[in-house]
Image (spheres, rainbow, N blue to C red):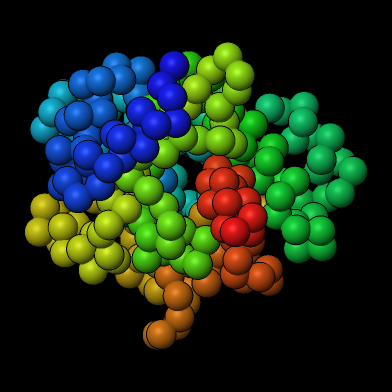
Amino acid sequence: MLTLKDIEDLNSSLMHSRPREILATVCNEFPRCAISFSGAEDVLLIEMARKLQPKPAVFTLDTGRLHPETYQFIEKVREHYQLDIDILYPDAQRLQELVQAKGLFSFFQDGHEECCGIRKVEPLRKKLAELDVWITGQRRDQSPTRVEVAVIELDRTFSTDSHQVVKVNPLANWTSEDVWNHIRMLEVPYNELHDRGFTSIGCEPCTRAVGPGQHEREGRWWWEEATIKECGLHVGNVREKSSD
Ligand code: SF4
């Protein structure tokens, strides 16, 4: 198990490195690592990882509430890279209990945490129990909750006393413009909802297009306050900021 100092040192040594170098170092040092795939950034991570190894480990969360375009996008990526994407699903019984008790849109009344907890956080927790490192497309410029995202960090949400999970964010220093310049240059697949004003795409009921000048993640859980807009996957961003 790494100490906090080891993780901070690794972060310091890689914080100005290019994403591909970060991926190469991490995948070499931690064989039990996988890319978490959902958005545009994550395809770039897959593209880079594919240049390091033919079949990088990739997983995605199917919450059951994604847009049809997102399912098509997942399939497009799977075919484009000939990848076995590990698709994670929520526990059917937990979901049934929630829906029977509160209906299909409880998040509009009592917030997204409970539904995201069942549909996203629990399946992810189960997956991360098999991994030492997960790789995400988080960037600092995405939202107020992500301005302090490190390149390498201890994942305090999913680490336990007996199992440490490190989160790696190779694109932390990139901007949205960097991402889209690379997507166009490399001609990698992207979710067609991006062409219709969706900048950050999550579940269908909880995502809407944003207008010019709006922040990238303003279309996510738009009925909630900006500083709590994390779905639980990266809830450490919220906790760490709010404890400042
Ligand atoms: S984003 Fe919305 S529908 Fe999806 S898991 Fe969270 S609350 Fe549920």
Q: Depth check: 30 or 137 in front?
A: 30
Quadrant of the rendering where the C terminus is positioned: bottom right
Asked whether residue 181 appears in the rendered view, the answer is yes
Task: Give the side of residue 182 with respect to residue 197, left or right.
Answer: left
Residue at the (52%, 61%) spot, across then down: 145
Residue 204 spot, x, y in % from top left: 57, 58
Q: Depth check: 124 or 210 in front?
A: 124
Q: Depth check: 119 or 166 in front?
A: 166
Q: Is residue 216 above or below residue 80?
A: below
Residue 143 spot, x, y in % from top left: 47, 66
Looking at this view, name the residue that lies furthest to the right: 101
Q: Quadrant of residue 226?
A: bottom right
Looking at this view, name the residue that lies furthest to the bottom: 212
Q: Is residue 116 above or below residue 199?
A: above
Residue at the (59%, 36%) spot, across then down: 157
Residue 140 spot, x, y in % from top left: 38, 60
Q: How many marks?
A: 0
Residue at the (33%, 69%) spot, across then down: 195
Residue 161 spot, x, y in % from top left: 61, 19
Quadrant of the rendering where the N terminus is positioned: top left
Residue at the (22%, 35%) spot, across then down: 23
Asked whether residue 193 appears in the rendered view, the answer is no
Task: Give the side of residue 62 with respect to residue 86, left or right.
Answer: right
Q: Quadrant of residue 35?
A: top left
